[in-house]
Each structure stands twice: as C-alpha cells, then as structure tokens.
Image (cartoon, helix red, strand yellow):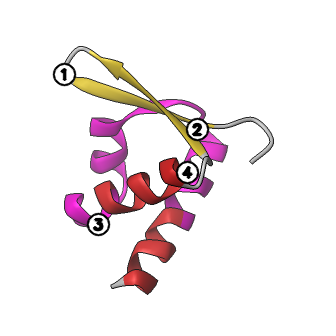
Amino acid sequence: MITEIGIVAGDIWHYLDAHGAVTLSRLVRDLDRPKELILMSVGWLAREGHVILINEDKDYRITLRKGS
C-alpha cells in the first residue's frame, strides 16, 4: 500500500506541476485513481511539505510549495 501511495503522490505532483493550483474535487475527477488513495497521497505530500492546502468552503485548493 505504501508503494501505491507513493506512486499516486508522484502522479499528483506531476499533475500540479502541469496544471497549477486545483481543487481537491477536480484532482479526484481528473486522476484515474480511487479517491481514498488520492486523499492518502495528498496527506503524504502535505506532511512532507511538498503541497499547500487551503480550505475553500466545502473543498480544498492544492498547490505545490515553491521550491519542492
């Protein structure tokens, strides 16, 4: 499972690098991965300091941290 989380975290990083800041709901819609796996991977990226999460009403905006 840790390997899958790491692979999806890489997919998310590349997606954000190409598209800029996106909402969590758009990320789930655009990536062909289970929502639970995306959430775990976003959490990992956030814990490692690679992304910034901003609460926007009922969603979150995710962006890469500059220099990551």
Name the residue carrying label 4: 15
Name the residue carrying label 3: 37
* Residue shown at 37% from the left, 57% from the top: 31
Label at residue 19: 2
* Residue shown at 27% from the left, 37% from the top: 25
Q: Amino acid at mark 3?
A: Leu
Give the main secondary structure of the magenta stretch.
helix
Of callouts 4 and 1, the N-terminal one: 4
The residues tagged by marks 4 and 2 sit, at their Cα atoms, a distance apart of 6 Å
Name the residue carrying label 1: 58
Tell me, yes or no, whether the highlighted magenta stretch contains residue 45.
no
- Secondary structure at badge 4 equals helix
Q: Quadrant of residue 48?
A: bottom right
- Secondary structure at badge 3 equals helix
Of callouts 3 and 4, the N-terminal one: 4
Tell me, yes or no, whether the highlighted magenta stretch contains residue 35.
yes
Q: Taking 63 as reference, is 49 above or below it?
A: below
**Neighbour class for label 3 at 10 Å: few (<14), some, many (≥20)?**
some
Label at residue 45: none
* Residue shown at 56% from the left, 66% from the top: 10
Q: Amino acid at mark 2?
A: His
Q: Amino acid at mark 4?
A: Tyr
The residues tagged by marks 4 and 1 sit, at their Cα atoms, a distance apart of 22 Å
Q: Position of residue 43 (x, y in %)?
A: 40, 53
* Residue shown at 40% from the left, 61% from the top: 41
Tell whether 6 sits left or right of 59. Answer: right
Q: Amino acid at mark 1?
A: Lys
